[in-house]
Amino acid sequence: MARTYAFSALKGEYQQRWEQMAITPRQQGAIDRAAMTILAAKSRYQVVAAQTGVPWAFIGVLHWREASCDFAGVLHNGEKILGTGRKTRLVPKGRGPFRTWEEAARDALALKGYAPGSPWSISRCLYEGERFNGFGYRMHQVPSAYLWSFSNQYVRGKYVADGVWSPTTVDRQMGIAPLMKRLLALDGDVSFEAATSAASSGPTAGDGLDARAVAALQQRLRDLGYFEVGQVDGQWGARTVAGLSAFQATAGLPLTAVPGQARVDTATAAALATASTRVVAPARAALTARDLLQRGDGMLRAAWWSKFWAWLIGAPALVIGVLEQAPEATGRLDGLRATFAQMPGWAWSLLVVGVALSLFMLSRRVEADRVAAVRSGRDSGPA
């Protein structure tokens, strides 16, 4: 039977090794690439974190170690069994079958007894990471490669297969501790203590989602192209309801999003985990600036008025500048020029034309960007 260890007995060791850990310089590039891969998939890890109470970044480093962040590989051990109807054959054996990566991840974490409200910290994550892989390295008085590989805390020794130990083999896969430290440096949102507060704080509605879970939902919807959701702010408001409702309508699900009730039903959560990027409707893709203006788009209305004033100011100034160069017109312009003191008429005209042209071009750019955003689905268009 595998030996187990209490966290209280190992906490000090983990903290000391963490403080003394230095990343192996030649592995810095690989660690950076792995960290960026985890950050790119943040929204998927946050969905599982909201359901399990486990810090999303810890889920990410486990996923890297087990499957190099390949979402075809289950969190348990990286086996690619999703949607096949098969169960895991490696340790832990017999888990599944699973339809989605998120479903498998919840099972892998529940298998270790993780639940919302569990305490988390750097030391706790290191302990749980070693427990996730097993305490076999301790039986050989070797710091776990699962934790410390690619750092000065690990030299050699590795299980080359389940239960098969080699004292001379060097683990060529990075450990989770250097990866955790790099994530902390790259993203201020990374906290290996986040799950404790996420499970017990923030605005909730009954058994609904807290602020972190709402933010994860908003990011997932944006990743899928449902920009009706607005900005990622963790607030369950009208735009979040609109984005979630748009997703449910596209997925053929019942519309369950209700203002003031931050909840996502099981069917929607499962669909969010496996959904493909939103396909923009042909009618939306063909929208023009005139269409949006007729629908009362505030941004395009402002751009239209800016272009109007640019023409209203710029055209007369241009005419005046041209007339200024005509000898027969100079007498007619004397009164106007006197108004602007010593400034030559042509210089005044050039200045005004330049400002008007800049305003016109800026308005055109705003108009084009707005139309492109609505056509692509990056923005929902006029409310």
Image (cartoon, helix red, strand yellow):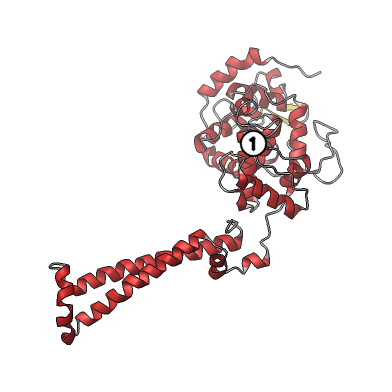
**Which quadrant is home to the C terminus?**
bottom right
Q: Residue furthest top?
A: 9
Quadrant in the rendering for residue 123: top right
In the image, 308 versus 123, the foreground residue is 308
Q: Position of residue 258 (x, y in %)?
A: 69, 42
Q: Amino acid at mark 1?
A: Ala
Q: What secondary structure is found at the residue carrying circle 1? A: helix
Q: Is residue 72 left or right of residue 87?
A: left
Does residue 177 appear in this view?
Answer: yes
Q: Is residue 80 left or right of residue 314?
A: right
Quadrant in the rendering for residue 355: bottom left
Q: Position of residue 55 (x, y in %)?
A: 63, 31
What residue does disc 1 label? 213
Above/below status of 319 relative to 4: below
Q: Which residue is located at x 70 percent, y 15 percent?
A: 5
Q: Is residue 322 left or right of residue 82?
A: left
Quadrant in the rendering for residue 372: bottom right
Q: Which residue is located at x 22 percent, y 70 percent?
A: 348
